[in-house]
Image (tube, rainbow, N blue to C red):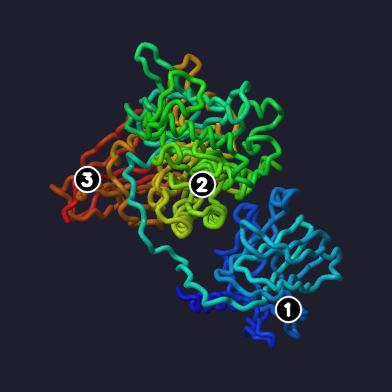
Amino acid sequence: MTIRALLSLTVMAILFSCKNSGQPKVLPVKLYSDGFQKITAIFKPFVYDLNGYADESKGDPFNLFDENAYVDPRSDDANSKEYLPRTDPRPRVHSELYFPAKSGNRIVVDLLVPYLLSDVYLYDAAEGSDSVWIYTGNMRQWRLKAAYASKPYLALSGWEKYALNDSSRYVMINFKSPKTVVTEMVLYGKPFGPLPALPDAAYDGPRLPKKPMREFLGANYFNEVDPVWVKPFYFSRIYSYTSDFDHDTTDEYPHIKYDMLRLGYWNNANRDYYFYVEKLKKENKSEAWHSIAGLPILMARRGFQDKGRPVTIAGMNSEDPLSYGRHAAMMWNLAAFFGKTKVDTDLLSISNSPRCSGRGSLTLFENGNEDDATWVGPKYCNPLEYFAQSSADFDGHESRLGKRFGIKNADRYSSLITDGLMELDTNRIKVYKFLCSTLRDDKAFLWSGGIQYHHYSQRNLVSAVTPEEDSLRWRLARVRDATYRIQPGVPCILGENGYDKNQSSRQATPVIPHFNAEQSQGIMILRSINATAFSGFDAYILFWLKDDVAETDKTVYLTSGVIREMPDHSVRPYPAWFYISAFENRLADFVPDSILSENGSVWVYKYRNLRVPDSVAYFVYCPTRNGTKLDNYQLVVGKAANQNATLINFADNSPTGLPVQMKVSNGKLTIAVEEMPKLIMLNEIR
């Protein structure tokens, strides 16, 4: 889309908004006598909030520029009520998190090309007095151009002008606190050259190959579980702590010795190490990674709590990659020990003996977990902090820390996965991309292993809903397309999703008539997996694999497991485990093919076998939870080889499902459809 076309669409959208909100018409762009004009080519994809609030706080940093088309502070009508801006960029929820005392709240606008900037105007809505600063320059070096104290009373509201007199592509505005209400920011200048063409709003570039179901599913858990129960899951996301690997309380950095024996030990009989992740890889042909969060044990003992930044020395600048040397050294040792590349073992700084390298068992590393959590108060991690840690963990911030820091300096095959975001926050990923492009010389996107989102189908954080009530597939499809626009070629992972069995939990599974809570949990998980697969996501990681408590435990997420370890240490599988196992077993080599029906009382999805393209499977169900059932539904399947089809019923105690042979008549199959999905498998004649 050309810049002119995008501007036209922007104007049309504003006109429509104005017509429905009583706002004035779009003003023509005027060239003033000094040769400067109002800069209207400011677009939402290129406005960045460095504190990461746009998706989670119900605030929008673009509101600082969204009314530029119909305000002109230099015009004679600037102070007419008709032409006063109304929207507000401030975060609405948890606003205290996004205004840290040291840095305040920062919004950066990328003008796409350098401009000769003359002035900036701020509309001060005057609700409270505090400091505002405006900078030009870039992310590595800002130049302070204006400092301003907002007005304390509404009667003092109005436009404030400041001279910039500088050349810059980027402008940053910094608010000290949420007391300041600046509703619009208008820049004046002259561009140095034409604006580049902007990308289309919809992504139409190449997409990653679809994953067969044998490589699509995963599960979250803490401790070692018999691989037989992990069989349906290709990925194991294993929650771990920095203190599992960094619990040296004797040596001082940089002489820390890291411990590689998380879920492992030296097997003297075999003269080799035993590692659970290697057992999974060998027996299940699967992949695992550690989600490593928290602090070294020494920092924890000194009073620092989980979710604090794992800087080398307490008090270091958490937005500086060079502050994370200790953590980056741990990541280097992990990749050197577990990765595919053999390095000189004398270079390893580990406590376990004998030393070894290049075991080829772990090449994916997640350096945190929900660091964007809003419930941790001042320990909230902003995008700059997470970028800084990740740049160190990736390659020692382009080896500025040294050659023995970061996974890439140990093993070129290893990759970072973003720490799981607590929600579908594409804004934060957009900011990560911007920081990589502006704060690294190589502009490398650091998380080639995957961009990970967490999402539970809930209503107002009070009660769980079905995936269909949550519009899960549509919701995830939008996120997948947005992620492609931000960073094509990187897998998109739904890293947490699931339901509790206990009905007192806010994440309690909706219970379907004639099914109990355990069965209903399995039904909701099956429908969620299907929705995720057809959204375009590249992996679905179930929360959670194994319960350690009874189904009556009311704590949220503690009864989300699909198996339970009993008091005598035996394992009880729930119906959900059998449903998932049958789904994966039957569709191991299948990928999503097409959505045949996604409205009305019956929804139908079609899978196709990658190895045998004539082999297809239909996933059919009623998308409700009120006991809906249709006894004689006519499923259109076309021509089937020998008119044969196999209906697979998911059953509580069958890891492969219960097959029923059926005959196709006139290209149709008559089946009973209910809220428990069914699979219909056949070989089609094309």
Residue visible at 55% across and 42% down? 392
Element at label 2? helix
Of all residues, the one furthest to the bottom in this rendering is 33
Left or right relative to 644: residue 47: right
Q: Give the labeled residue for mark 1.
A: 73
Query: Which residue type does callout 2 highlight?
Result: Glu
Task: Give the CA distance from mark 3 to mark 2.
Answer: 42 Å
Q: Is residue 275 visible?
A: yes
Distance between the alpha carbons at the discs numbered 2 and 1: 44 Å
- Crowding around mark 3 (Cα neighbors within 10 Å: few <14, some 14 to 19, many 20+) is few
Where in the figure is residue 395, as x and y percent of width and height?
Answer: 49, 43
Foreground disc of the pair 3, 2: 2
Taking 123 as reference, is 564 above or below it? above
Q: Amino acid at mark 1?
A: Pro
* Viewer-proximal residue among 216 and 159: 159
Residue 611's label in the rendered image is 3
* Nearer to the camera, 604 or 66: 66
Q: Residues within 10 Å of mark 1 (few under 14, many from 20)?
A: many
Q: Quadrant of residue 243?
A: top right
Q: Nearer the viewer, residue 80 or 448?
A: 448
Residue that carries the numbered disc 2 in the rendered image: 398
- SS for tag 1? loop
User: First in sequence: mark 2 or mark 1?
Assistant: 1
Marks 1 & 3, CB-CB < 8 Å contact:
no
Mark 1 → mark 3, Cα distance in angstroms = 64 Å
The residue under the point 51% across, 51% down is: 470
User: Visible in this render: residue 552?
Assistant: no
For discs 2 and 1, the disc positioned in front in the rendered view = 2
